[in-house]
Image: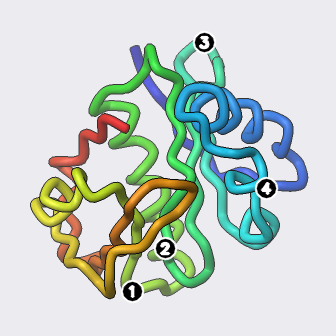
Amino acid sequence: MAFFAKSVDWDNERHTLKKIREKVFVCQWRIPTESEFDHQDSIAFHVLVVDDHNQDIATGRITPQGEIGRIAVEPEFRGPEVYQALFNALLNIAREHGIPDVLIQCALEGVNYYQQQGFRPVGKVFMDAGVARQNLSCNLNHFNLERVELTH
């Protein structure tokens, strides 16, 4: 199966992006709706991943400051190919907009994994929607896209 990532506009694709994020974050992970959707959505660059049947299966965003987030993938499609397509599109957006460093927030159990991808911890651990998280940063030249395989 092939997967295609495309840049989309929040105003035009809001319904589709929210549907995927609500299913993954609000229903599955039980993140409060008010925490999931924020003011960044209207200014961020969004990516939508579809399969070869044009079924919407994943989304993610990158802010103008380079923060990658809101990575939501339908459970049955979680695998390296989908994450490759999604991250490749997000990193291309960063390059197109001259964003040299990307940032990501992850749960503490994911820190070691992201360090293997080229990220380094930034700042202190903090709580977000009841989850202990760490900010991590990576220069685009050091990001190892070939090893991206997120599980959550």
Residue 41, by quadrant, is bottom right
Left or right: 100 as drawn, with respect to 66:
left
Q: Position of residue 93 (x, y in %)?
A: 53, 67
Which residue is labeled 4 in the image?
Answer: 9
Instruction: Please state which of residues 25 and 16 is positioned toward the viewer in this rendering.
Output: 25
Residue in the picture at 18% in, 49% down: 146
- Are circles 2 and 1 on residues that touch, CB within 8 Å? yes
CA separation, marks 2 and 1?
Answer: 7 Å
Which residue is labeled 1 in the image?
Answer: 100
* Sequence-first disc among 4 and 3: 4
Residue 127 in sight here: yes
CA separation, marks 3 and 1?
Answer: 34 Å
Q: Secondary structure at mark 1?
A: loop
Q: Is residue 22 above or below residue 127?
A: above
Left or right: 139 as drawn, with respect to 76:
left
Instruction: Please state which of residues 107 and 17 is positioned toward the viewer in this rendering.
Output: 107
CA separation, marks 4 and 3?
Answer: 21 Å
Which residue is labeled 3 in the image?
Answer: 53
Q: Which residue type does callout 1 highlight?
A: Pro
Instruction: Please state which of residues 29 and 72 is positioned toward the viewer in this rendering.
Output: 29
Q: Position of residue 94 (x, y in %)?
A: 48, 73
* Sequence-first disc among 4 and 1: 4
Left or right: 137 as drawn, with respect to 67:
left
- Residue 46 is marked as none
Residue in the picture at 58% in, 31% down: 24
> Residue reaching furthest right?
11
CA separation, marks 4 and 1?
Answer: 22 Å
> Residue reaching furthest front?
130
Residue in the picture at 80% in, 55% down: 10
Q: Position of residue 130 (x, y in %)?
A: 51, 54
Q: Is residue 119 above or below residue 50?
A: below
Which residue is labeled 2 in the image?
Answer: 94
